[in-house]
Image (tube, helix red, strand yellow):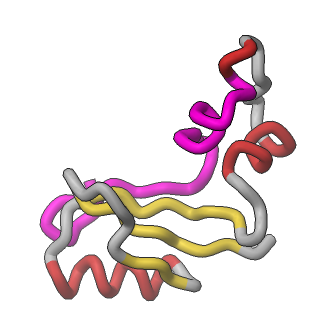
Amino acid sequence: MNEVWIFHAEQAQLASGVFSTREQAEAWIRRHGLTGLLTSYPLDEGLYDWAVTHSPFRPKRSEHTTPTFIGRFTSAYRPNEHYRDGRPV
């Protein structure tokens, strides 16, 4: 599966880095002593669609199919790691 690693810094509104490998992302996070969340995202597929196909998540209520819900959707079923001051926590 093709994936990218996206870093979202604590209290940031937007992502601050996109990497082709976890190793590259972690090196950048360490170098800058960053705090935030590094998450793997599928390439060429929305996270909502990935979760419906590859995780236990299933839309159960009508609001689960709205643009707002789908646009804000996130999944703990993707590999992710929290960092504080450049180190995993």
Relative to 32, is 89 on the left or the right?
right
Where residue 4 sits: x, y (%)? Answer: 60, 74
| 68 shown above or below 44 | above
Q: How many marks?
A: 0
Where residue 44 sits: x, y (%)? Answer: 77, 69
> Which of 52 and 14 lies nearest the eye of the viewer?
14
| 54 shown above or below 79 | above
Q: Residue at x 20, y 62 (%)?
A: 35
Q: Residue at x 19, y 70 (%)?
A: 34
The region drawn magenta spans: 64-89
> Which of 52 and 64 lies nearest the eye of the viewer?
64
For residue 87, which quarter of the picture?
bottom left
Residue at the front extreme?
A: 67
Where residue 65 sits: x, y (%)? Answer: 74, 27
For residue 68, which quarter of the picture?
top right
| 1 shown above or below 80 | below
Q: Quadrant of the N terminus?
A: bottom right
Q: Residue at x 15, y 75 (%)?
A: 33
Q: Residue at x 48, y 55 (%)?
A: 80
| 28 shown above or below 85 | below
Q: Is residue 17 magenta?
A: no
Relative to 8, is 58 on the left or the right?
right
Residue at the right extreme?
A: 53
Where residue 83 sits: x, y (%)? Answer: 26, 60
Relative to 30, is 71 on the left or the right?
right
